[in-house]
Image (spheres, rainbow, N blue to C red):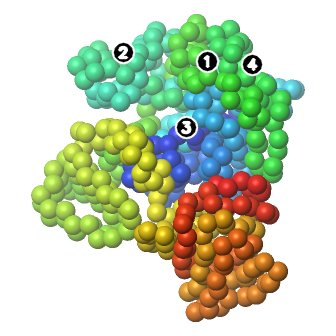
Amino acid sequence: MSKIQPVVLSGGAGTRLWPASRSMFPKQLLPLASRRTMLQETLIRLRGIEGCSDNALVVCNEAHRFLIADQLRDIASSARLILEPEGRNTAPAVALAALLASGESAADTPLLLVIPADHVVDEPGRFRAAVAGGVAAADAGQLVTFGIPATRPETGYGYIRADAAATGPVAVEAFVEKPDAETAAQYVASGGYFWNSGMFLFRTDIYLDALQEHAPDILSACSASIEGISRDGAFLRPDREAFAGCRDDSIDYAVMEKTRSAVMVPLDAGWSDVGSWSALHDACAADANGNTVVGDVTQRDCYNSYINAGSRLVVAVGLDDAVVVETSDAVLVSVKEKSQDVKKIVDDLRRRKRVEANSHRQVFRPWGSYDSIDSGDGFQVKRLIVNPGATLSLQKHAFRAEHWTVVSGRARVTLDDRQFDLAVNESTYVPVGAVHRIQNPFDEPVHIIEVQCGSYLGEDDIVRIDDEYGREGTNT
């Protein structure tokens, strides 16, 4: 029986699903299509595949590591996290995993099952059957990809040309770039085209050999990075300096379009890459009028629309084929056919240096979270939530003072050479330059209102002296 090593790619930013998805809290970490997050659903989908390891490798961004670790604990997953030093697309990400997996399995070469963390699969049984159908071909040294039968003209996907009657592994005739609408319609009408799912199954040695042949520079940089890897519990950190020299490239461009060993297994399992709000609407249950409604929404005479209220009441009247998404700091209103263009809006927000492009008002940290309630010239108000047993870093600030008031629970405060507890309605003042820390050794979360005052209030005004989460010396 072949051993299958899952590799889950969780490095994307999901900008087309802004404002819910942002680079600091992307779509794979959100519960968009079910009560679980997309990452959790992806890992659960792997259970039941014969020979599949429970010890998945999740390739992710360093900034997401604690969020992902929390989500893994929630589903009792033993997955390990490979922390990409920088995003370099899928070919290097999978190379890191392949090198790590091959080094751990000298006795038997595992198959890598590469899957993105942000896809919806309505019929996981069919997904598992398709994976099983590709094992023999992968064992024989072929590079297996999974093609989705194209049911409509879709300009947001790449295509695979292959035998339309295929039921098992079949030779890939061509990989095709994302087409325009007219070309996409011709593809669907011909019946010989499948959507490129971005999922793969192959032996580690075969993939590494293919990289050596077609992209040796990627393999060289990734090999050097793995040689310098460091381990911190479930976190695996490839060497940053070595990886920085790796170029950005996808598996499709670097390997699959060049190899003669590519085969495709059809996958008809209710798949969606949820690449836009329109795609998410299609993947979700709808009411009799075709509407998908999430949160506190009141609507009248609306049809075929997606309406999501994240933090307050949203009222919609007379909408047709529309998208409305509300969060605590932004509202998106779009016609569905233009929902792919949300990415352009995010690019514009980044050019204007708007924080809403990258992070939500509520920002998660390994100790809990903070919510920026209000701000103005020389002040900022936050609500901190510190989880039971959690501890903020021992730190100081060069430009701001802080006032803390406990509104729920209890906090243990370190302030220079003093340590004391604060209960509800008790407060303290942290002067500029004072060394301070908040701890919660108690059984309930503690909620603190923090008022910052100073000439500069950026999050990088932090000098960390000691930190339980390995962030000493950093200021982010």
Which is more N-terminal, label 1 or label 3?
3
Q: Nearer the viewer, mark 4 or mark 1?
A: 4
On the rendered image, what quadrant is the N terminus found in?
A: top right
Instruction: Please name the amino acid that badge 1 sits on.
Output: Leu
For disc 2, the marked residue is 192
Can the viewer see residue 90 in this picture?
A: no
CA neighbours of label 3 inside 10 A, class few (<14), some (14 to 19), many (20+):
many
**Alpha carbon distance from label 3 to label 2:** 25 Å
The amino acid sitting under disc 4 is: Ser
Which numbered disc flags the more N-terminal residue, 2 or 1? 1
**Regarding mark 3 in the picture, which secondary structure is present there?**
strand
- In this picture, residue 111 sits left or right of residue 179: right
Say whether marks 2 and 1 touch (CB < 8 Å).
no
Image location of residue 475, percent across then percent down: 67, 55
> From mark 2 to mark 1, how far is it between C-alphas?
20 Å
Crowd class of label 2 (few under 14; some 14 to 19; many from 20; radius 10 Å): some
Where residue 335 sits, quadrant-wise, is top left
Residue at 38% x, 62% y: name it.
329
Residue at position x 52%, y 40% in the image: 12
Residue receiving disc 4: 220
112 relative to 337, above or below: above
Tag 3: amino acid: Pro
Q: Which label was assigned to residue 116? A: 3
Q: CA distance from mark 4 to mark 2?
A: 37 Å
SS assignment at label 2: loop
Estimate the x, y position of residue 267 in percent, counting from the top left.
47, 30
Whole-percent x and y of residue 110? 75, 28
Residue at coordinates 55% horizontally, 60% vertically from top-left? 458
- Left or right of 96? Residue 170 is left
Q: Give the mark, 3 or 2, whose residue is nearer the N terminus.
A: 3
Disc count in the image? Answer: 4
Secondary structure under tag 1 reads strand
